[in-house]
Image (cartoon, rainbow, N blue to C red):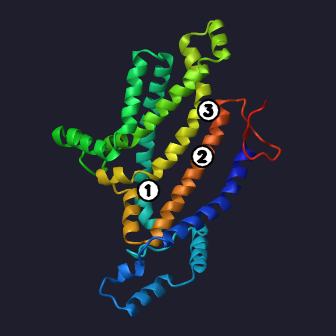
Amino acid sequence: MLRYFFKRLLQMIPLLVVVSFLIFMFIRMIPGDPARLLAGQDATVEEIEKIQRLYGLNDPLFVQYGRYIAGLFSGDMGTSLRTGRPVADMLLPRYSATFTLALTSMGWALLIGLTIGVVTAVFRGRWPDYIGMLVAVAGISVPGFWMGLVLIQRFAVEMPIFAVTGLRSMKDFVLPSITLGAGIMAMIARNSRSEMSETMRHDYIRTARAKGLSEPEVILKHALRNSMVQVMTIIGLQFGFLLGGSVVVERVFGIAGLGGLLVDSIFFRDYTVIQAELTIFAFLFIMVNLLVDLMYGLLNPKIRYGGGGADEPEQPV
């Protein structure tokens, strides 16, 4: 497994280079000139060209990309075109808020989603199944911005239990994490129910019951563990999206996170901040999926990692 892990880490380097290049070129396709925005509407052509020379915006694109990728590998993400501050200094204070919000959202979504999935699979076709799936459908269907506004109105204005906006303590993560995690909870519930229902029909589940194992042991030790191999894929993908998909929630709850900074940077055509954030999101997404691959081997001992040059987990026949 260690060999597989380090091999995947090495494979990440060319992948990140390709992703960073695509991000770099895509950003340059956004309409608008950042030099003109910085100079103002009444700026002369000479003033705009001066700003372009100052930030190297008039250099060929491959020269700009080479400068960016060289700085990235040396730990320098560049300087913000809008504020003149190092991009790293702008991202670090906001990263903790976004990452903590993603963790808390995924934490409760995983706990409740798996609980609903297991209960509805065990009581398939009965009233717990209908109630659980109703909750799951509601979690997917309700728009995040609307849920956030309703939660603020109910639990921050009418009943001042939580703060209206901002983050001052872990208590303030409750409402935004519920808003952000509702859809993830619903997806986990639906997928875990489907996988659990399929697993419960296998012969080894009947064999475990025939051996005299209690029903909780059969469900948790055998059915749930084997079902989690497929559910982990959904969890990994959704956690990667959580890290970069909290823009609406951060706006609704006034959280100074990476999502809000990304929106502001796109509005002001702050190329260096946009490409740094998107590259970080891509790196985290790749890392999360690598960890999910490793979790397969922990959940199912039959899964082995190829030592003879295989790049992916193999299931022996």
Label 1: few (<14), some (14–19) or many (≥20) C-alpha neighbours in 10 Å: some
* Mark 1 or mark 3, whichever is nearer to me: 3
Answer left or right for 285 relative to 125: right
x%, y% of residue 98?
42, 52
Spatial distance from mark 2 to mark 1, Cα to Cα?
20 Å
Residue ID at (73%, 51%): 7
Label 2: few (<14), some (14–19) or many (≥20) C-alpha neighbours in 10 Å: some
Spatial distance from mark 1 to mark 3, Cα to Cα?
30 Å
x%, y% of residue 128?
41, 18
Residue at mark 2? 289
Query: In terms of secondary structure, where does tag 3 sit?
Result: helix
Question: What kind of residue is marked 1?
Answer: Tyr
Question: What kind of residue is marked 3?
Answer: Val
Answer left or right for 142 relative to 163: right
Residue at mark 1? 95
Residue ID at (35%, 91%): 44
Q: Which mark is residue 229?
A: 3
* Label located before the other in sequence (2 or 1): 1
Answer left or right for 285 relative to 155: right
x%, y% of residue 113?
45, 31
The image quadrant of residue 294 is top right
* Label located before the other in sequence (1 or 3): 1
